[in-house]
Amino acid sequence: MTDQEVLGPIIDGKVVASGSTPKFKAIYPVDGKEICEIYSCGQEQTDAAVRSSEEAFKSWGKTSFGERAAVLEHIARIVEENLEYFAKNETLDTGKGIGESLVQIGNSAKIYRYFASAIRSHEDRYIRYDNGTASVVIREPFGSVGLILPWNAPSMLLSWKLAPALAAGNCAIVKPASVASRAALNMVLRFQEALPPGVLNAVTGSGPDVGNALVKHPGIRKISFTGSTAVGREIGELCGNRLIPATLELGGKSASVIFDDANIERAIQFVMLGSLSSAGQICIAGTRILVQSTIYDSFVEKLKTKFDTLRVGDPMDSDTQMGPVINKNQFDKVMGYIDSGIKDGARLVIGGERLTGGIYDKGYYIAPTLFADVKSDMTIACEEIFGPVLSIMRFDTEEEAVSIANGTEYGLGASVWTKDINRAMRVSQALEAGTVWVNFYLDSPAGSPFGGYKKSGMGREIGKIAIDYYSNIKNINISSSDDVPPIF
Ligand code: NDP
């Protein structure tokens, strides 16, 4: 299968490549080389994408659960049959290791299959009251929904949004991040063989122009957004003004709470996985590591040794464990945080610099960076860095651990490491986070609702509940009586 030479908005199943609209470039983060050019949308194309979606909804919105399930299964097969092609595209867009891309694309197929099965087995609710009336509670699709993607995991996050949106009977218009549009656009194109024209369209171009136009478009009935808290707030305000629902998956600063009775070797493996996947550019990155004082020094030493042996390099090499950050903007931002950690007096244990020589000179490679003796009010402990930088903090008691873990404005994820089941349950319940893992991290199966507390967002993606977030809930009250009652 060859790459689409010309990419741009996808409307009614076809790429709209118009010479009159500006183009932007897809860049490979590893060497800064241009991979292809992508046509951007003007207002005219955004309007056309929404019109086509509204037209398609007239039939798609009436499809049976079984028909939608068959389409989602077809999409899952497309993903599975093109696993390596899609994984390569994901790595070309983001610079993440090919092994990680393969896992994420494999998970996407599972997401489409999960929602196929969830909608096939879906039953509306029937409630009978003791006065003889009854309710039938049904879910109805909104219509055309806007799905706005970030750059860090475009293929997987497309599945998180698209699968429940289609299962619920909506038509979708995808807006990928302009720095990583190519992988998502190629997926949207390949998925067309499973879908009637217009059910899945895409718009392209910058967030403040094209994304904003999509959110404001009167034909759009719901927005699902993943990205920064600042843009999420802006989109939330616009949706609030329009009185349309918005699901917002925003930033995170997730804590791992490690007690001295934990399986430390296992904890360290998951700390590495949870904080250095995608070079730390994941919303759920567990970058605040809280370690009980009794094991603090030995934990820091063991983690340092692991950091030292991490294979950082060419993401297309399956032995590579970490690639570069996506671009200069992200590099500058992460290096700024490293400077702030040093200035604030945190102890730099390892890393803290740009890697140089060979392949490192072409992309933006940052050495995996470990700060110890971090205080909870330091900037590196509070703000989302979105890079390979970890802060290790110290605690003595369970209460102190919970207080430090909750002392951030984010609340996306957390993990608890202990062999004491009572403590695991107590701490999990006390943590302000949408997902808490006990003695592991990062795994998000299709059936688990995912989303944030506090400034990490609103609403949930994946899990059966996600279908509700793409549905209007209608209650039909039915009387069993023919009596003519008095008015009062
Ligand atoms: P942004 O929030 O800037 O962008 C996310 C998406 O929204 C992109 O498609 C972007 O388009 C679009 N967008 C930007 N501005 C608007 C707007 N005004 N109206 C509508 N859409 C808009 O996040 P980035 O992807 O640039 O990442 C920046 C930061 O966000 C990261 O450093 C990280 O902190 C956080 N982030 C969090 C993620 C999570 O999963 N929680 C995932 C990714 C990022 P375009 O890029 O084309 O301008």
Image (spheres, rainbow, N blue to C red):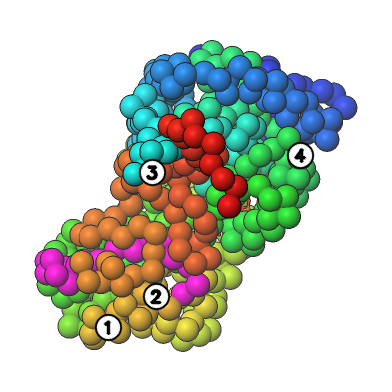
356 or 422: nearer the eye?
422
Count neighbours of disc 1 (C-alpha within 10 A) and say few if under 14, some if 14 to 19, many if 20 or more.
few
Name the disc covering residue 218, or none: 4
Callout 4 touching callout 2 (CB < 8 Å):
no
The label shown at residue 131 is: 3
At label 3, counting other C-alpha atoms closer than 10 Å, the crowd grade (few under 14, some 14-19, many 20 or more) is few
Residue 176: % across, % down: 62, 39
Which residue corresponds to the image point at 47% horizontal and 84% vertical from the top-left?
377
Of the numbered discs in the image, which one, if any, rests on residue 399? 1
Q: Going from the N terminus, do you reach mark 2 or mark 3 first? A: 3
Q: Is residue 411 magenta?
A: yes
The residues bearing labels 2 and 1 have C-alpha atoms spaced at a distance of 11 Å
- Image coordinates for residue 488, horizontal then vertical, percent: 58, 52
* 2 or 1: tag closer to the N-terminus: 1
Could you tell me how far apart the alpha carbons at marks 4 and 2 are, in whole angstroms?
Answer: 39 Å
Task: Looking at the image, tell me whether mark 4 or mark 1 is earlier in sequence order.
Answer: 4
How far across and how far down the image is residue 292, in percent? 23, 79
Numbered disc 4: secondary structure = loop
In this view of the protein, can residue 471 be seen by the observer? no
